[in-house]
Image: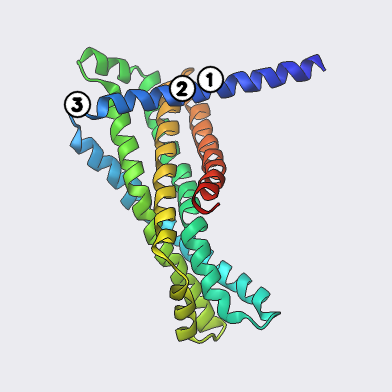
Amino acid sequence: MINMLTATGKIVENLCLRLGLYAYTFGRAVSRMGSRPWHLRMLLQQAEEVGVQSLPVVLLTALFTGMVLALQSYIVFHRFAAESLTGLVVSMSVVRELGPVLVGLMVAGRVGASFAAELGTMRVTEQIDALWTLSTDPVRYLIIPRIIAVTAMMPLLAVVADFVGIYGGYAISVYALDQNPAVYIENTTIYMELDDFYSGIVKAGFFGMLIGIIGCTEGFNCKGGAEGVGKATTRAVVISCMSILISDYFLTAWMFG
């Protein structure tokens, strides 16, 4: 019993420590965003890394997610002679939930790990300390561009994923399941509202901010050499994915509850 309480206490202590570090990093970044210098070159470089180079994995994920969702929905609706609702289910599911969440998970695995590994390597090789000696604020130079880039690019990636996922569902429904394309498109658009798109965009932006804060915090506070970099990278990915899934519930309850 005592061992269980001790283990629980350590878990709570580590959780509070991590939350404090994330809040501290976010506060430091926000307090410096409004003042110069603005490292636009670094911002554009990170935007390309997050947005352009993440497109292949995002496109493949969205395409096959839409295809699988359409296939499974059709199989279920076929039992009730309601196959025409396949387009509605695919579009609403992708736009509201699967688009932003799956994009967030893919970006967390790719970009969050990259942020933690890069900053962690710079920390253990004392490159961050060298920036201080050169009168360069590492928070302004390394952290702020990354957080802004991933927060700004995530909604764009989510919009692309929405359209690709809906097209994947359309392709399977029309060409493989022989559904009427006009009926599919009508059911996709007639019940869709702008608020559905806006909710997905807001979610994606929030998930991007979480990925940036967590990845940068884990790398920036890395210790213990190469082993520490590996642990920081693992924590960044795992905590980012868990944060996305947990926050998705609360955002959904707030927007649609």
Give the residue pinned by disc 1. 17
Q: CA distance from mark 2 to mark 1?
A: 6 Å
Q: Tell me which label, 1 or 3, sits earlier in the chain.
A: 1
What residue sits 32% from the left and 27% below the top? 29
Height in image: 6 above or below 245?
A: above
Figure label count: 3
In terms of image quadrants, where is residue 189? bottom left
Give the residue pinned by disc 3. 35
- Secondary structure, mark 3, is loop
Q: CA distance from mark 3 to mark 2?
A: 23 Å
205 left or right, relative to 87: left
Q: Are marks 1 and 3 in contact (CB under 8 Å)?
A: no
What's the coloring here?
rainbow
Give the residue type at disc 3: Ser
Q: Tell me which label, 3 or 2, sits earlier in the chain.
A: 2
Query: Where residue 154 sits in the image (x, y, percent)?
Result: 37, 49
Residue 226 or residue 101, whichever sits in front: 101
Height in image: 104 above or below 165?
A: above
- Secondary structure, mark 2, is helix
- Camera-near label (3 vs 2) is 3
Give the residue type at disc 2: Leu
Q: CA distance from mark 1 to mark 3?
A: 29 Å
Residue 71 or residue 252, whichever sits in front: 252
